[in-house]
Amino acid sequence: MQRSRRSTPYPFTWEIPVAVVVAVLLLGALGAQAGRSIANLLTGNGWVFVDSADLFATLAGVLHGQAGAGLPGLARPAGPGLMWTCVGAVELVVAVAVVVAVKAGLDRWGPGRLQGMASPAEAEALLGRTRLRKHAKVIRPDLYGPAKGRAW
């Protein structure tokens, strides 16, 4: 029955997958920069985030283990071990968030989604106790009908 409703599906084009890949790469870059900033915060430098113009230019330095790349005025940047730990923790959180978002998106708009399902409020209006009690005389006339002593 599900396949019969999808006789003319929308064609799968390249825009949506490219947007998803770009968003994931951007989240990865932001996660690396945020992990570096958390490592610098833990070493006592305060919260220092890279300028938006230098976001991608300083990414190579961060990936080489330089916690002070692109951040002028740091007295004592974080060490590579602490920085990699913080970057790994932030990237793990980002990866879990991306997986949850992809799962939710596929459940909502993906090819295996259920179509034609009623919302809980609609199901209650059609099948709930309120309607059953309202139409009890029609559903069970032997129990709730107008003449209980009538022989059928």
Image (cartoon, rainbow, N blue to C red):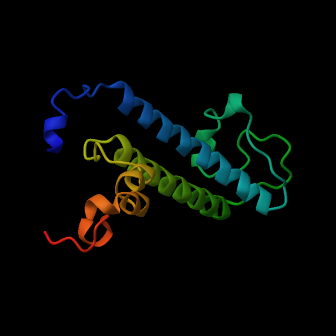
Q: Going 54% across and 53% down the picture, which residue do you hit?
A: 94
**Which quadrant: the N terminus?**
top left
Q: Going 32% across and 68% down the picture, which residue do you hit?
A: 144
Query: Where residue 114 sits: x, y (%)?
Result: 28, 47
Is 107 or 51 nearer to us in this picture? 107
Position of residue 27 relative to residue 147, above or below, is above
Q: Is residue 66 left or right of residue 7?
A: right
Is 41 or 127 nearer to us in this picture? 127
Q: Going 81% across and 51% down the picture, which residue do you hit?
A: 47
Query: Where residue 7 sits: x, y (%)?
Result: 15, 30
**Which quadrant: the C terminus?**
bottom left
Position of residue 48 relative to residue 151, above or below, is above
Q: Is residue 127 left or right of residue 7?
A: right
Position of residue 45 relative to residue 12, above or below, is below
Is 106 or 96 nearer to us in this picture? 106
Query: Where residue 15 sits: x, y (%)?
Result: 37, 25
Query: Where residue 136 sits: x, y (%)?
Result: 34, 63
Q: Going 32% across and 25% down the picture, which residue do you hit?
A: 14
Q: Is residue 19 left or right of residue 43?
A: left
Count of picture labels = 0
Position of residue 28 relative to residue 42, above or below, is above
